[in-house]
């Protein structure tokens, strides 16, 4: 049995006497051995089998050092931003209020960074506070809804069409599909970088949904709140729905 | 067996493993699996769950091997991973907590000295229940400090708190145990 801490040290609280007896009991010195249920050879063999399965791209990705994993996620975000701005920039970029654009993009950026950090948080670090993880996940839909439900950034006829619900839904569906495709790429990368541990699916879903919204904010010139809520925020909702479905399939909390 | 004569430190073994020495990982496994199992078994109610935590802990060490830096200590790594996995396992399975002694029927009944053959086991089960009734933060510190002989500085690294906070948690935890189990002093 390992030697117990020296309680004569004035800085060490005096432990109850019966803890020593409990420790002896755990180690089999009073009959029951709590290690009796451990078969080292079998456990080693099972572990060797799991390690042998660590092959392929996903295994390579998750074995990268954490700074490299974070860099890879950042790289994909960079590709999304630059690619959209270079080839698919929104038509109303010149007239869209700069302050509003910075505020919306800044909100998305802060939330993405927070969610990526938490999604890739290594298990060898003390766990991040659960309230912070909840804030990061809930911040995605709440932060986006705050901006999308606000009065339109501008009401140029091309950006703020007076359309009925049906046509609106059709246009929103286009954004929903395109945004979800971008979100899917982010989710796939994060899933490959993930080393395991619960509570990651919702964080990854938030990241993915935000990445989709980042692209849409840079590309889509529709400023109608209804369109933004259904077509853009809907991407986040779909991502969360996917994460919850995956939780059901894997049998563990998202 | 080679690992019985392997006197390399945990950190040297981990560095060797990162460089491709599979035998080094086996030595680490043999050294630490029993300790990790005992740590997990104390918190979880089944041998299978505790074995699962040990396996997942070492699998995580394998996956995170390129995060291990020269000069780092391996033991805090192992304990941090194991305790994170135990907490996740606990939440995931929403198992009924071990009955607190505050509500246990035995606490309301006069304590009767069991037969000698059962004496140590009975007392130890009461100690285990008392440990389970502590707040997680205090319980973790006491388990690492008392059972795993970890210094406060190491415990602070594992649980992500200051050394002063860890000492306070230990003090409060030990005091609470003495309150719950006065008859065993």
Image (cartoon, rainbow, N blue to C red):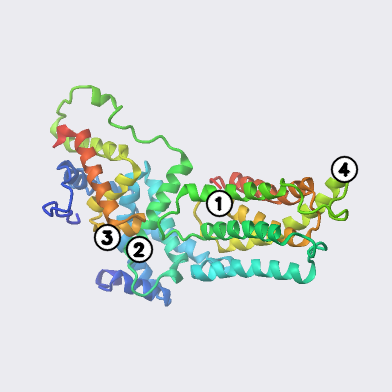
Q: Quadrant of the N terminus of chain A?
A: bottom left
Is the same chain shared between marks 3 and 1?
no
Give the side of residue A58 with respect to residue B152, left or right: right
Disc 2 designates what residue? B29
Q: Chain of mark 1?
A: A
The percent coordinates of residue A201 (x first, y second) are 58, 52
Residue B18 vs A38, above or below: the answer is below
* Closest to the observer, B34 or A86: A86
Q: Are marks 3 and 1 in contact (CB under 8 Å)?
A: no
Residues at badges 2 and 4 in contact (C-beta under 8 Å)? no
Foreground tag (2 vs 1): 1
Residue B103 appears anywhere in the view: yes
Q: CA distance from mark 3 to mark 2?
A: 24 Å
Label 3 sits on residue: B153
Q: Quadrant of residue B17?
A: bottom left
**Residue B97 falls in which quadrant of the image?**
top left
| Residue at position x 17%, y 52% in the image | A12
Label 3 in the same subunit as label 2? yes
Quick one: label 1 or label 4, which is nearer the N terminus? 1
What kind of element bears circle 3? helix
On residue A136, the disc is 1
Residue A64 visible in the displayed image: no
Q: Is residue A96 above or below residue B128?
A: below
Q: CA distance from mark 2 to mark 1?
A: 36 Å
* Chain identifier of the residue bearing label 4 in the image: A
Nearer to me, A22 or A144:
A144
Q: Residue at x 31, y 27 (%)?
A: B103
The disc placed on residue A166 is 4
Element under label 2?
Answer: helix
Q: Nearer the viewer, mark 3 or mark 2?
A: 3
């Amino acid at each position: 049995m390992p030697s117990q801490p020296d309680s004569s040290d004035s800085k060490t609280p005096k432990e109850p006497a019966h803890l020593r007896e409990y420790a002896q009991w755990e180690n089999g010195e009073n009959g029951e051995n709590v290690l009796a249920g451990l078969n080292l050879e079998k456990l080693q063999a099972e572990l060797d089998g799991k390690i042998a399965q660590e092959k392929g791209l996903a295994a390579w990705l998750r074995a990268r050092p954490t700074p490299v994993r974070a860099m890879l996620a950042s790289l994909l975000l960079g590709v999304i931003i630059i690619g959209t701005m270079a080839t698919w920039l929104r038509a109303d970029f010149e007239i869209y209020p700069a302050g509003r654009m910075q505020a919306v993009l800044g909100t998305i950026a802060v939330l993405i960074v927070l969610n990526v950090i938490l999604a890739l948080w290594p298990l060898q670090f003390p766990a991040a506070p659960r309230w912070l993880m909840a804030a990061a996940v809930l911040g995605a839909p709440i932060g986006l809804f705050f901006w999308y439900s606000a009065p339109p950034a501008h009401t140029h006829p091309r950006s703020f069409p007076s359309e009925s619900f049906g046509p609106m839904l059709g246009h929103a569906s286009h954004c929903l599909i395109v945004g979800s495709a971008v979100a899917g790429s982010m989710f796939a990368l994060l899933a490959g970088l993930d080393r395991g541990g619960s509570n990651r699916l919702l964080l990854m879903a938030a990241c993915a949904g935000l990445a989709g919204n980042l692209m849409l904010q840079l590309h889509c010139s529709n400023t109608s709140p209804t369109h933004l809520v259904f077509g853009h925020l809907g991407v986040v909702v779909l991502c969360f729905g996917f994460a919850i479905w995956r939780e059901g399939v894997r049998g563990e909390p998202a | 067996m080679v690992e019985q004569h392997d006197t390399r430190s945990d950190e040297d073994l981990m560095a060797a493993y990162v460089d491709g020495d599979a035998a080094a990982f086996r030595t680490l496994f043999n050294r630490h699996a029993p300790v990790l199992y005992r740590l997990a078994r104390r918190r979880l109610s089944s041998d299978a769950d505790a074995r699962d935590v040990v396996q997942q802990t070492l699998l995580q060490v394998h996956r995170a091997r390129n995060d291990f830096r020269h000069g780092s200590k391996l033991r805090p790594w192992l304990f941090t991973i194991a305790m994170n996995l135990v907490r996740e396992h606990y939440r995931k399975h929403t198992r009924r907590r071990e009955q607190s002694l505050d509500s246990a029927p035995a606490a309301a009944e006069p304590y009767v000295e069991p037969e000698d053959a059962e004496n140590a086991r009975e007392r130890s089960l009461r100690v285990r229940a008392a440990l389970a009734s502590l707040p997680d933060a205090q319980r973790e510190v006491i388990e690492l400090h008392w059972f795993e002989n970890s210094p406060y500085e190491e415990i602070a690294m594992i649980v992500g708190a200051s050394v002063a906070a860890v000492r306070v948690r230990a003090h409060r935890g030990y005091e609470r145990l003495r309150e719950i189990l006065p008859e065993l002093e």
